Image (cartoon, rainbow, N blue to C red):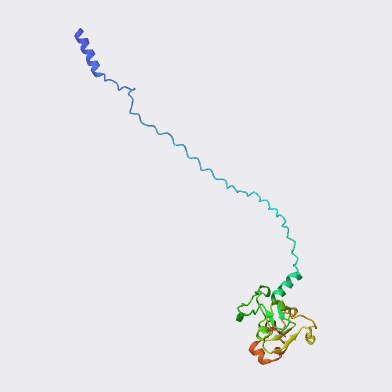
Amino acid sequence: MAKAVTATKKSSAASIKKPVAANAKASPVAKKKPVAAAKPAAKKAATVVKKAPVAAAKKTPVKKAPAKKPVKKSAAKAGSKKTSAAPTRYKCRLCGYVYSSLRGEPHNGIPAGTAFEDLPDTYVCPVCGYQGKGKIGKWGFEEWRPTRYICSVCSYVYDEKRGEPHRGIKAGTKFEDLPDDYVCPVCAQDPKIRVQFGKVLKQGFEPLQV
């Protein structure tokens, strides 16, 4: 009887299969997280950048410099220019020889441009010495200014004492005071001279040393 019961238990035990453990852990499957629905891209608000109004720059009033008044040339300056144009000459009181610094006496070793004051103390009048009148030194000369000028082309003589009244130049007008456009009246009337030399201006005159 006892054997029969054990046999029955074994057979029942064999017939009963072990249930699969429900709690058996299945291989963990990574659950995919639900993808969040992409938010629609926010529309960029068309931001209109308003430029701040530029403050109009205030124009600083520019002070105009006072207009310079034309400076009148002083008579002293004008006189100095005339002096440089007409250098001082010295005339021998005995023979009338005129020493000019513009010309000098190159044949006597005195170069052009030598002022009378710079002549050596041994200087003597070359004409008086040549004529046998003795040695006339610097003491025999006096300051002299020409009053007559001769045209180097036609030999017309302009005399300051006479002037040229028919041309509007009063008597006593100095040669230096003649207008810059002054022309020799004789050369101006000669067509041959006009063609060959053109207008003979003041530069075409030289002092007449008489």
Q: Position of residue 148 (x, y in %)?
A: 74, 84
The answer to which image quadrant residue 5 occupies is top left
The answer to which image quadrant residue 118 occupies is bottom right
Position of 48 with respect to 79 (left or right) is: left
Residue 156 or 165: which is nearer the viewer?
A: 156
Residue at 71% from the left image edge and 76% from the top image edge:
139
Residue at 20% from the left image edge and 10% from the top image edge:
4
Residue 126 or 1: which is nearer the viewer?
A: 126
Q: Quadrant of the N terminus?
A: top left
| 192 in relation to 89, above or below | below
Count of marks overlaid on the render: 0
| 55 in relation to 109, above or below | above
Kindly tell me whether residue 190 is visible in this rendering: yes
Q: Position of residue 100 (x, y in %)?
A: 68, 79
Q: Position of residue 153 (x, y in %)?
A: 67, 88
Residue 109 or 54: which is nearer the viewer?
A: 109
Q: Quadrant of the C terminus?
A: bottom right
Residue at 20% from the left image edge and 7% from the top image edge:
2
Kindly tell me whether residue 204 is visible in this rendering: no
Position of 7 with respect to 134 (left or right) is: left
Q: Position of residue 120 (x, y in %)?
A: 65, 74
The answer to which image quadrant residue 168 occupies is bottom right
